[in-house]
Image: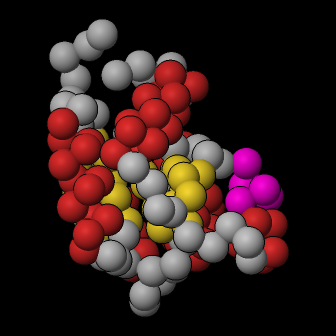
Amino acid sequence: MTDKKYRVLVVEDEPSICQVCLRTLEGMGLDVTIAINGQIGQSLIQRDTFDLCLVDIRTPVMNGKNLYAYVLNHYPNIAKRIIFTTGDLLDETTRGFLDATGQPFLPKPFTPNDLKTIITETFQKLGEQN
């Protein structure tokens, strides 16, 4: 375990989900930044460094799919650090996108324990156990 405080970007437009993410992730000792859409998330990624990104697939202005495409092209090292969230797993397009990326995803609605589990598992897979 290291003294480094890991930084997590949450791209989510639903205030109640933002609050759950903020409380849960800060409770895990993580430094959390919230972006209410993909465009703001993109700006933050351009100027800051994040250890993990939790990205809702459906956000206004720029959705999670477009944000992922941008990150994959410009910051491929960050692309592998994205966890998607979605309430739309039955949609074939969404399911196909998630399958194609190979990235972990968290179905909505999720509990704080679900969030903790996927964050911990992802850090472990990345070799940055928190």
Q: Position of residue 52 (x, y in %)?
A: 41, 44
User: Whole-percent x and y of residue 30?
Assistant: 23, 37
- Classify residue 27 by image quadrant: top left
| Residue toward you, 16 or 93 | 16
Quadrant for residue 116, please give it.
top left
Please tell me which residue is depicted at 56% across the width and 58% down the height of the picture: 107
Q: Main secondary structure of the magenta part?
A: helix
Quadrant in the picture for the N terminus: top left
Does 124 sit left or right of 113 as displayed? right
Q: Is residue 64 left or right of residue 88?
A: left
Judge whether 91 appears above or below 73 on screen: below
Residue drawn at x 68%, y 67% is 89
Specify whether 57 is left or right of 93: left
Is residue 43 rendered magenta in the image? no
Q: Residue at x 38, y 39 (%)?
A: 113
Residue 40 is situated, as x and y percent measured from the top left of the image, at: 32, 75
Q: How many marks?
A: 0
Q: Quadrant of the C terminus?
A: top left
Q: Is residue 30 above or below residue 86?
A: above
Which colour assignment does the render follow? Answer: secondary structure
Residue 47 shows in this picture = no
Residue nearer the viewer, 107 or 52: 107
- Magenta range: 98-102
Residue, x 32% and y 76% (percent of image)? 14
Report the residue that reaches farthest toward the bottom.
61
Residue 110, given in percent of the width and then of the height, sits at 45, 54
Q: Is residue 69 above or below residue 13?
A: above
Q: Is residue 105 visible?
A: yes
